[in-house]
Image (tube, helix red, strand yellow):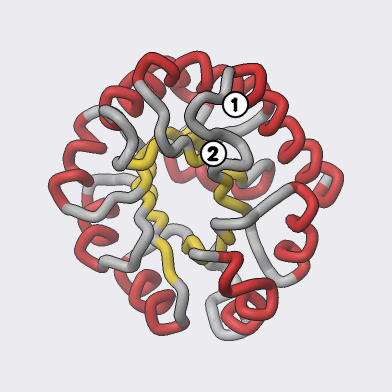
Amino acid sequence: MTLIEQWQDILKTLPLVAILRGLTPEEALPVGDALIDAGFKIVEVPLNSPQPFDSIAKLATHLGSKAIVGAGTVLKLDDVQRLKDVGGQICISPNTNVEVIRFAKALGLISFPAFFTATEAFQAIDAGADALKLFPAELAGTKGLKALKAVLPRTMPVFPVGGVEPGNMKEFLDAGAAGFGIGSSVYKPGDTPDIVHAKATAFVEGWKALRG
């Protein structure tokens, strides 16, 4: 299965991104295993975490085809290249930087930039983004997402990120969300693998209850 085929399959089955901000390389494999065991298929290590590329390299090697592994908070072209070099597959940014998007696509990565306005969204789409991250979703709200979805291409997946909990997923899904990025509600520094597994399971069960 190619990376794009794997990505398309995840979009159809369980499009939830675990954002592991603050993860250390020592925690990477136990936490990664806990997430995969719960059902997650996309793992993001933000670059403002300790030694993030070490964690990404470990996770990418260890999880193999079980998950798409990559970096978040990607702001520079050098970081896109380094992500590719350590085996990362998905490039997630907190902003709309068309140079980062284009370079990620040129290297064969999944490009997943953040946006907040329609202008940013269309800039990202024109640059080749595979999906869009609505951030911060708690500020845009479901009304903001619904209004944006009315003008965006129907085939472009939009993932709310920020403030997402199992209890409010339905509201965002009804407004047009294709999936979610989940940060401290699934992992925060100090969480044991058991805690991560329990949090992740709550999201997976919530998703399946809503989408089957």
The residue that label 2 is drawn on is 18
Q: Which residue is rendered at x = 67% and y = 29% of the image?
A: 39
Rendered location of residue 154, percent (x, y)? 60, 73
Q: Which residue is rendered at x = 51% and y = 24% of the image?
A: 190
Q: Look at the picture and state if 78 lies above or below 30.
A: below
Number of numbered markers: 2
Residue 98 numbered tag: none
Disc 2 marks a residue whose amino acid type is Ala
Tag 2 and tag 1, C-beta contact below 8 Å: yes
SS class, disc 2: strand
Residue 35 numbered tag: 1
Is 130 in front, or is 163?
163
SS class, disc 1: helix
Q: Which mark is first along the chain, 1 or 2?
A: 2
Q: Look at the picture and state if 155 lies above or below 207.
A: below
Q: Quadrant of the C terminus?
A: top right
Disc 1 marks a residue whose amino acid type is Leu
Q: Look at the picture and state if 79 lies above or below 199.
A: below
Q: Look at the picture and state if 43 lies above or below 55.
A: below
Q: Which residue is rendered at x = 68% and y = 69% of the image?
A: 176
Q: Which residue is rendered at x = 35% and y = 55% of the image?
A: 93
**Residue 204: which quarter of the image?**
top right
The residue most toward the front is 190
